[in-house]
Amino acid sequence: MKAVIALGGNALTGKDRKTDIKLQFETTRNTAKSIAKMIKNGWHIVITHGNGPQIGSLLLQQKKAMHEIPSMPLHVLGALTQGQIGYIIQQCLLNEFKKQGIKREVVTIITQVIVDEKDPAFKKPTKPIGPVYNDKEANEMKKSYVMGRVENGWRILVPSPKPISIVESKIIKKLIEENVIVIAAGGGGIPVVRKNGILEGKDAVIDKDLASQKLANEIGADILLILTDVDYVYLNYGKENEIEIREAKVEEIEKYYREGHFPPGSMGPKIEAAINFIKNGGKEAIITSIDKAWEAIEGRAGTHIF
Ligand code: ADP
Ligand code: MG
């Protein structure tokens, strides 16, 4: 079985998206245990992940140090976070494999993702990155960044163009077919445009769920497993009449999407990724929490879309 596992923010950092390094290792260690179960069952696996909190922290560090050290643009920060998070996941997985006697290699691929220079997203930042700020902090931040409201405060917003294709998908496919566990398309991949055949980085952050779907289809994955902080996708989420979706066909999910059950920036892109994955030849998309991952694979939990 070939699967792409997309790790959400809470698989790598705490609920408040703080980037304390001890917490990142602790959280990732727990995630590694979950993933080891699938690996034990002989799956070919690509792990993708978000980078919102980490790239936000790096952006602020650039700003604070700009008078002493040249600032790095967002696309370079994207590469830095792929290296940093890839390292943490690699080490946590290898340590868990050692404990369980699993003999598999793990590698992180710095991944570039083609976007369209004319994507309207470049003119309208929508993607939240960095920590959550209170009203007072946000007012100060508004001088330098576009700030947007989130559930419990404010976050920096950056452009989020649609992924078109994954530059490194061929080598990723080769590696997983060799049984190597690959960490790729971290943070949704580094956004690049191709001009007359030449690649060039762009200052934006691609949605990791949409990039994961592109990669999953390009490598011919059977399953797209999106791990987040809810056990199920719900209808009427957060309301009194909320109800979990256990199984749904694409047409059914598309109808719920149109009815507005899945907001942009959180559940929306996961649903869009699931729909696109199936329409482009994928067998099944599963959305669930890290803790329920294995149960979901066995069909006992999670939202299954096919
Ligand atoms: P991740 O870091 O995993 O991408 P997000 O915060 O982007 O996490 O998305 C997951 C969140 O989506 C959940 O924590 C939940 O608050 C929110 N959400 C919005 N609508 C729904 C829904 N219909 N069903 C379940 N969760 C939903
Ligand atoms: Mg998200």
Image (cartoon, rainbow, N blue to C red):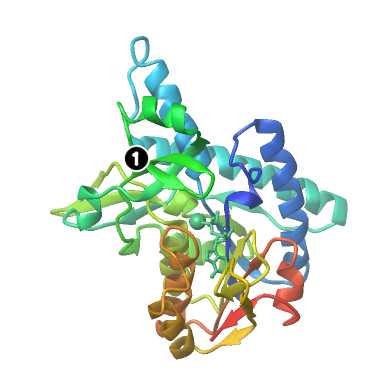
Residue 21's image quarter? top right
Q: Secondary structure at mark 1?
A: helix
Residue 164's image quarter? bottom left
Residue 119 visible in the snapshot: yes
Instruction: Give the residue at the far left of this rendering.
Output: 196
Q: Quadrant of the N terminus?
A: bottom right
Q: Position of residue 202 (x, y in %)?
A: 27, 44
Determine whether, in the image, residue 296 is placed left or right of residue 137. right
Which residue sits at x=45%, y=27%?
Answer: 136
Q: Position of residue 152 (x, y in %)?
A: 54, 45
Determine whether, in the image, residue 279 is placed left or right of residue 226. left
Q: Is residue 126 above or below residue 47?
A: above
The front one of 120 and 260 is: 260
Q: Is residue 80 above or below residue 239?
A: above
Q: Is residue 211 above or below residue 160?
A: below
Q: Position of residue 76 (x, y in %)?
A: 37, 36
Which residue sits at x=79%, y=50%?
Answer: 96
Q: Position of residue 27 (x, y in %)?
A: 71, 45
- Give the number of callouts: 1
| Amino acid bearing label 1 | His
Badge 1: residue crowd in 10 Å (few <14, some 14–19, many ≥20): many
Which residue sits at x=33%, y=44%?
Answer: 158
The residue carrying mark 1 has its beta carbon less than 8 Å from ligand 2: no
Residue 8's image quarter? bottom right
Residue 219 visible in the snapshot: no
Question: Residue at label 1?
Answer: 75
Instruction: Give the residue at the far top of this rendering.
Output: 68
Q: Is residue 243 above or below residue 107?
A: below
The front one of 140 and 118 is: 140
